[in-house]
Image (cartoon, coloured by chain):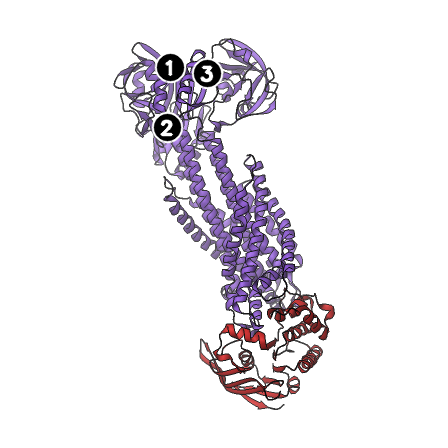
Amino acid sequence: MDNITALQTHNLTHTVTSKTGDLTILKGIDLEIKEGESVAIVGSSGSGKSTLLGLLAGLDRNTSGDITLYNHSLTSLSEEKRALLRGEYVGFIFQSFHLLPSLEAIENVMLPAELKGDKQARQKAERLLEQVGLSHRLTHYPRQLSGGEQQRVAIARAFASEPKILFADEPTGNLDEENGKTIINLLFDLNRSQGTTLIMVTHDNKLASMCDRQLIMSAGQLKEGSL
Amino acid sequence: MNFALRFIFREMRSSEVITLIVALIISVGTVTSISLFVDRLQLSFEQESANLLAADRLVRSDEPILTAWRQQATDLGLEQASRASFATMIFANNKLQLSQISAVSDTYPLKGSFLVDTQIFAKGFASSQSPQQGQIWLSSRLASLLNVNIGQEVEVGDKKLTVSKYLVLDPGSSTSAFAISPRAVMNVADVAATNVIIPGSRVRYSLMLAGNRDKLNQYETWIQPQLKDGQRWQTPKQKGQRIGQTIDKAESFLLLAGTLAVVLSGVAMALASSRFVKRHLMQVAVLKTLGATPRVLAKLFLLQLLFLFVIGALGGIVGGWLIQEGISSLLSSLMTTTLPEPSVSKLWLGIATGFISLIAFCLPLIIRLIQISPLSVLQPAARVEKNALAIYVVGFIGLYGLMCLYTQGFMLPSIMTLAIGGVGLVVSILGWVMFKLGRLATSGATSGWQIGLASLYRRLTPNLFQLLVFTLIIMLGLILVGIKTSLVSDWQAQLPKDAPNHYLFNVQANQVEGINDISQQLGLTSSSWFPMVRGRITKVNNDRIEKLYPEGKSEPELFEREMNLTWADQVGEGNKVVAGDFHANGISLEQERAKEAGITIGDKLTLNIGGISYTLPVTSIRTVDWGSMRPNFYVIVPKQLLSHYPANFVSSFFIKAGQEQAFYKAMSGYPTVSILNVGDLVKQIQTIIGQLSQAIQLVLLCILAAGALVLIASIGSTLEERREEGALLRVLGARASLVRQALIVEFGFLGLFSGIIAAIGAEASLYGVQTFVFKTEASWHPLLWALGPIIGVLLITSIGVFASRTVLKVPPMLLLRDF
């Protein structure tokens, strides 16, 4: 199992065009992540962490170089194909949760499974919400939940499609310490029990040190590091 | 101040403020274009009616027109014509005949035209020239009574005049259907030489005016205070109730359309301003923590509002002007006459709409905004919705006030409000049920159908609101279609194709049978014969009229002159008894005349018929449909009163085009019978109806355009959420086509539901409008039930998908950047 490569990049470069000229955010990044690994990407604000995460997850197309997700080259795929790939392999947790405000907690969790046409969506969502300790909050709307609870729903949603690889963007960034701790524990528990690959962007060194590997982003370059 | 301006210019770039400005431009623009266009139509109707008046305005007097009056008209640059009408004897071939003469100036008629012919009893052709000096035009009947032909001379007093044409219609007197004496028209310059007008003669002098409306209004303001008894200022609208009623109905309709524009604008304003306020909540809270006082904030936002108002109003006026110009030029190819220029004074309505809307929909929200606690910085969950009800109430009052301003009354706004309130309630209930059913029928998110239908229920509150908005727009559109259909059919019913176009009067009892034979041979449609006996009211409750209305006090029309009395066993067609008993042994009066004379049931009237007086109580009051084109009477008396008098009979006929010659020829055997051709009057009315019906279609189009813009604005208010949802669905692996399909299903069903509910609402409102406003019989409108859902689906799906097209384009990456 350790031999399978979940994600690989080769000379990944990303440039954005702005009024003041072209700005290269990522400068030739080479990276390989094995299935089941947990990887933290740390770095200062504006160093390009979130951009890298988005590109790795196929949310956008890189300017040059290659990204391979489970043997699929993301660079050559259209947005349409990348969407299908995301549905198949990828789960996501955002700093600001991004729950749909008009959906109940359970419906938010069901969404990815439903998109896959999973008939068991509801049962799975119920189980996941129970695992994150929200079985009493199934029919609550996001606005009726605290920040910590919202992120727990988001975690349940991320695991609902049984992703092979989970991307987390500052998952505790909007939470207090206590809630942050709960979220982290949940995230790692679920990650372990489902055998998911985890790639996480964080400012929190403590959180980063819980991962198998730490990558430090600095001026568009990525270095293997230890904290 | 500097801060405020900097603030405003920063704001100008934000989408909410742009939306608000656009909403203002739309609301001011829509109202401006409609009010300008309505104004042009009204001017056009006035022109049409002016053709019946033979002028734009006229002053009528029993004394010769004062030189000062003419001078004032000259000073104002108005066109003038004059007419003197009097009854006198015309002499020819040793025959004398009492005639009604119009002596007119060379410039007469200022509007419309004469109908004349060179053949006796012919249909006539238009002539805008009046008789030259030394000439006279006789009606065919007069010519036949005097036994003269074209080219021969007749004597009017001391003056010999040559008959040059047969008069068919004098435009200025076309509605006086019951003039008993046959008519003639001569040049006013010949009047002095006739010596027939001596002190004490009954002459009706008219100074006719035409020209620029502002100048005419100026003239009216100038002359009104100078008018004495026996002098009257006449406008086209007063001339002929039939045309007046048509214009009134048109006004009602177009104002209803205007009200719709106001409602739409209000919705757009509310949506835009609520977004505006939402975005400023945090800003204000932060400013407060930085020490901004409510006073400073109030100033800041009021300045912003003022600035927005100025931009919106200016943009709206320019846009509105352009739109109505566009509509008018489109219309001009359809209409026979060009529309007159709109008056700049009508712009205030659009400006007022913008101002009141801004106050009604923005100000309460801004006040709440200013009152927000600085603590909200720390607790973003604390929202302004707490007092939402108060905000809606102010918005409603503003809207209602605007509607009242528009319709100059409470009836229409109240009906509209009730309808909207009812629809709101029904929409909420039905919408909830429909959305719920849609949700139950589908589960999962594998197809656009499921996601689309499910999101209807998921976004319940905003969707119910949108459902309400869409339903109202479609419903009001349907109401317009319905009103248009029922108005036009109502008019057509009033003036059916075979509406009588000829009146026959002065028919003796022994001639009735012969004329009936002619009618039968030619296969004509006729109404029944009404006997007429001349009589006059001399006393009211035993007080002599002369005593009640001494010299110098103008008497009501009922007592003014000798009139035609009739009897009838049945209440005539188009007559409706509103008080008393028609069959009682007494007098039945027409409601308007009775009201004018202050007579009610039980009052005793003394009638002088052929020198003998009869005193009878008034036992019933009737309304009369003057639009029926059938003979109608002010006064109906019991049969036994008139049975021993020789009666003249009157009837109306419908004569098909092409049959006139045959009919006139057959009737030449009855030279004493008067024939009045009113077919052209009917044609004139039908032209106005035709124009109105085209105008209605265009106003409807205009409103649909406004409605579409409101839809876009209302979708705009949920756009952020939709974009986020779209991005998220894509992140979670949904294909773009799935998101598109879901949008189509969502808007399609929203449209379908709206259309169905709109059809129900429109049918109900039409019942109310038909029954209470237009006072016509309510009817079913099957067309609406088909149109509603079809229009709903097509309109809302296309606009909805168009307005939310960015949902399909939003890069999923944005989710990492925070919305």
Residue A90 at x, y percent in the picture: 59, 77
Nearer the observer: mark 2 or 1; the answer is 2
Residue on which the image places disc 2: B657
Report which residue position mark 3 lands on: B649
Q: Amino acid at mark 2?
A: Ala
Asked if badge 2 and badge 1 are on a common chain, one would say yes
Residue B152 appears left or right of A143: left
Q: Amino acid at mark 3?
A: Phe
Q: Is residue B222 above or below residue A14?
A: above
Circle number at residue B144: none
Q: Chain of mark 3?
A: B
Can residue B582 be seen here? The reply is: yes
Q: Secondary structure at mark 3?
A: strand
Q: Chain B in the picture: what colour?
A: purple
Q: Earlier in the sequence, mark 3 or mark 2?
A: 3
Badge 1 is on which residue? B670
* Residue A91 location (% of width, % of height): 61, 76
Q: Is residue B364 left or right of residue B704?
A: right
On-image quarter of the C terminus of chain B: bottom right
Please, which chain is the residue tagged with disc 2 on? B
- Mark 2 closeness class: few <14, some 14–19, many ≥20 residues within 10 Å: few
Determine the CA span between mark 3 and mark 1: 13 Å
- Chain name for mark 1: B
Q: Which chain is red?
A: A
Check disc 1 and report its element: helix, strand or loop. loop
Q: Nearer the viewer, residue B362 or B552?
A: B362
Say which of B721 and B616 sits in front: B721
What amino acid is labelled 1 in the image? Answer: Tyr
Q: Residues within 10 Å of mark 3 (few under 14, many from 20)?
A: many
Q: Marks 3 and 2: CB-CB under 8 Å?
A: no
